[in-house]
Amino acid sequence: MTKLTITPGNLTLADLRQIWRGTVSLELTPSAYTAINTSAATISKIVERGAPAYGINTGFGKLAKTHIPNDQLEELQRNLILSHSVGSGELIDDSVARLILATKIGSLARGYSGIRASIIDTMIALYNAGIMPCIPSKGSVGASGDLAPLSHMTLALMGEGEVRVDGRIVPAKQALEKAGITPVTLAAKEGLALINGTQVSTALTLNGLFLAERMLEAATVAGALSVDAAKGSDAPFDPRVHTVRGQPGQIASAKIYRELLKGSEIRRSHIDNDERVQDPYSLRCQPQVMGACADLIVNAARTLLIEANAVTDNPLVYAEEGDVISGGNFHAEPVAFAADTLALAIAEIGALSERRIALLIDATLSGLPPFLVASSGLNSGFMIAHVTAAALASENKSHAHPASVDSLPTSANQEDHVSMATFAGRRLHEMAHNTATIVGIELLAAAQGVDFHRPLTTSPLLADVHQRLRQRVAFYEKDRFFAPDIEAAKQMVLRGDLSTSLQDLFGELYVH
């Protein structure tokens, strides 16, 4: 495992992808400690002066007017974490928990949060030991920060609650002892710094972003294979068509389709004397739809990269001036908007893929055997696999309803507008799995269609994908237990197997 050095404010999407995949350990650049220590010293001076400062020696939220004596400040921070650890639902995956820890480390280390270096070092030690806090996925409205889930994260630092190690849930105290990590005792403001922020919403949405990228790539590959399976035309991918429109994602997407289909014997077989003038939209308009999805993904990536490096707790400490300013960076509206646009992209990728499955099983449109199986009637073939795809595409339509337009006031109307970014990001995981299943079914259907065209072959690039699929799933000769085939294809989509060797093609679509 390689070591990733975090320079606060300079995490890249490539860094975040490595953290998500769990391929790196973490360290903090030594130059960060000056700002951290100066910020923590500023808090100590405020405590010594005794002047009221929100979150340092006062209550929280609606209780901000309550002054807390210095000898109770550690208890105040502990009580904050215990009382705010009220999450519910399934636990957040380790891949997302790693992103939460890493982005929180980076944010705190910028030196605007007033937290001691020892707390940040403990977070790094936790991460590197593979100790992932057990964080329930529900219970945050995306302002003021992801309070409940980040409280569960903080419990682990304190040796409270539960953690997950190598897939097993164990008491945090036991895991820390085994790893030789001393639980922290929180000083003034430190609990608030740890739980105020958008790191959970951001991590959940980054998870959705990285999955959306895989959906886009897999659906592009499957869609190109479907063009050959249906003996579609590559003329709609002509660069002249896309240049005159000017949409960047569309132009890049069309280029990818051209490259994927280059050298196809199936295409050469029907260039001349083809009675069909135009293909259905699900084949012909792929660059227009997938390119638009790519543009949404790129825009979301820009927002999320900024947020992953941001300081989003409250209040903020400006050590040079000695100021502590209460603001609202914990409001996750940018993340909610990014998540909502990713939801649209993920849903549309699946919706277009479902339409191509419907085309391929319809003999009147595709020219292939009905339901893509010999002896149809005796065999049902892909009939109900398409029904599954339709069900999941329809489900994604409901999930794609924007979360950011919703708000319920909390904290006795002190926090009277919230972003709902946490749910906005969380639902992307399920949506992506729905779309992965749809695209997996299309991949199976398109490969089946291409097989029916033998001895003609598809393009070299698509033939490689076809061969890798056939190593896992055999040709559908007659009806058999189909669910394992679909699951195998789905996992290829989720892992990014369809585009592993094609990153030079897809690389220009994304922010790196």
Image (cartoon, rainbow, N blue to C red):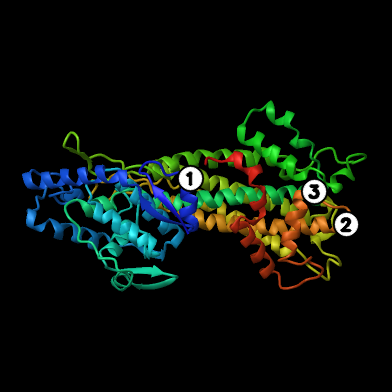
- Residue 285 in sight from this viewpoint: yes
Q: Look at 13% across and 55% down and name the residue there.
A: 73
In the rendered image, residue 234, in percent from the top left (x then y), is placed at 79, 40
Q: Quadrant of residue 124?
A: bottom left
Question: Label 1 to label 3, Cα distance in Å?
Answer: 32 Å
Q: Look at 66% across and 28% down and name the residue there.
A: 245
In the rendered image, residue 285, in percent from the top left (x then y), is placed at 71, 39
Q: Dot 2 lies on which element?
A: loop
- Residue 421 in sight from this viewpoint: no
In the rendered image, residue 451, in percent from the top left (x then y), is placed at 83, 58
Point out the residue furthest to the top here.
244
Lower sequence index among marks 1 and 3: 1
Q: Dot 1 lies on which element?
A: helix
Mark 1 crowd level (few <14, some 14–19, many ≥20, 10 Å Cα):
many
Q: Which residue is tagged 1?
A: 13
Q: Look at 61% across and 32% down and name the residue there.
A: 248
Foreground disc of the pair 2, 3:
3
Q: Look at 44% across and 48% down and name the residue there.
A: 403
Lower sequence index among marks 2 and 3: 2
Q: Which residue is tagged 2?
A: 454
Q: Which residue is tagged 3?
A: 459
Q: Quadrant of residue 239?
A: top right
Lower sequence index among marks 1 and 2: 1
Q: Is residue 235 above or below residue 497?
A: above
